[in-house]
Image: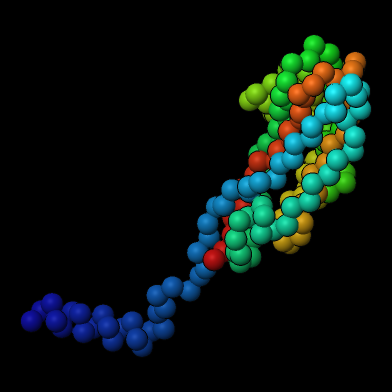
Amino acid sequence: MKVKVILMLLIVAMTTMGFECVNEDAVFSINVQGVSGTYLVPQGSQTLALTTWTFTPSQYLGGDYGDISNVRIYDIRVTTAGAFSGNVSGTITLNNVAVLTIVNKPWASFSAPGQSLITSTLFSAPNAAAIQAVIQAIKSSQPVVLGMSGSLSSAAPAGLSVTVEVLGQVDANL
């Protein structure tokens, strides 16, 4: 009997005092996915031609999410494949703004698992304004454009490629 009386008082209190069960959106952390591109270096070439890849929100988030409340870019990674004893120079861009320029670094230093452009001590600090521009684009569900160009110290043998990828996370409301 006591339990029923207490339960009845709780129900009356909740219905008359304006309590709501759930009144906020659920926030989930979602990995930014698929923001990467691979450039196949033509045999005999010393040029890494300007190449861009454009990613829509449905590609990099993998679904339709509500408002994006926070974006974290935690790495930009460059990975080379294929045997080459020379050096590489180049520029990585995000939304057509240079993030980082690589000057005359050994090709092998970018071999799998790749080289972080944000945390590595081999490079100067990345352009924070370019990273902020991409964060704003993701927050407002705009496309992201990843690009690269560069050169090799000598002619490329067959089978070389360069992969650039952006790793990040968003907090999205469902």
| Res 118 → quadrant | top right
**Residue that protrudes farthest toward the top in the picture:** 85
Q: Quadrant of the C terminus?
A: bottom right
- Above-or-below relation of 111 to 69: above
* Foreground pick, 45 / 36: 45
Residue at the image point whose x is 60% and y is 61% from the top: 63
- Residue 72 shows up from this direction: no
Q: Residue furthest left?
A: 1
Q: Which residue is at a point 63% across and 47% down the rendered structure image?
A: 33
| Number of numbered discs visible in the structure rendering | 0
> Measured along the vertical axis of the image, is residue 154 above or below residue 148?
above
Please state if 32 lies on the left or on the right of 107 as rendered: left
- Coordinates of residue 72 in the picture (x, y in percent): 66, 46
Residue closer to the observer: 133 or 2? 133
Point 85% across, 20% down: residue: 156
Q: How is the image coloured?
A: rainbow
Indicate the position of residue 171 as horizontal and vertical percent values.
Answer: 59, 55
Which part of the image, by quadrant, shows the N terminus? bottom left
Which residue sits at x=27%, y=83%? 11
Task: Determine if residue 51 is in view.
Answer: yes
Residue 129 is left or right of residue 35, and the answer is right
Q: Is residue 78 left or right of residue 151?
A: left
Q: Is 9 rendered above or below residue 148? A: below
Q: Quadrant of residue 164?
A: top right
Question: Residue 43 at x, y = what percent?
Answer: 85, 24
